[in-house]
Image (cartoon, helix red, strand yellow):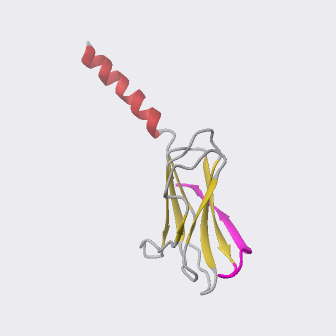
Amino acid sequence: MFRRITLLAAPLVLSGTIAHAATLGTPFLVINNVQRLACIVTNLGTLPADLSVKLFGLGGNEVLSPIDGCNIAPLDPNASCAVQAVPGASASCVIESSSGKVRAAVEVISDAASTTAVTVVPATAK
């Protein structure tokens, strides 16, 4: 009897943890040698969200991120963080989150000395 209850309850317990996880991604963006890419993530939920935010090159290799404010601690509700590539590094952004309430976008910044956005592309669910 105990075995049957355990087997019946397992899918319910597992689905509770998997159903709220989210993977988001942006398209690959080509930029010039002075522009910068920043992946910006916002938690719209009411609980902190665990994150993995990575930038990937065209060949699938991980792109160096000298500025990383996302992979250090859970993201608090209504808070945002950013992962930024070195100037001239074209990339896509992949976000894995423990919450389905996380939204993200990749922003192209005009040059290393500026904070002016040239374009912003929202991340979509994978």
Query: In x, y percent, where is residue 74?
Result: 52, 49
Q: Is residue 85 above or below residue 76?
A: below
**Direction bottom: furthest residue:** 33
> What residue appears at the point 25 percent right and 19 percent down from the top-left corner?
3
> What residue appears at the point 42 percent right and 27 percent down from the top-left corner?
12
The quadrant in which the N terminus is found is top left
Quadrant assignment, res 41: bottom right
How many circles with numbers are drawn on the protein? Answer: 0
> What residue appears at the point 50 percent right and 48 percent down from the top-left corner?
50
> What residue appears at the point 54 percent right and 44 percent down from the top-left corner?
99
Q: Is residue 121 above or below residue 19?
A: below
Q: Which residues are magenta?
A: 110-126
**Direction top: furthest residue:** 1
Query: In x, y percent, where is residue 70?
Result: 54, 58
Q: Is residue 76 above or below residue 63?
A: above
Query: In x, y percent, where is residue 18?
Result: 45, 40
Q: Is residue 88 left or right of residue 57?
A: right
Quadrant assignment, res 86: bottom right
Is 123 colored magenta in this rendering?
yes
Is 72 colored magenta in this rendering?
no
Query: In x, y percent, where is residue 24?
Result: 54, 55
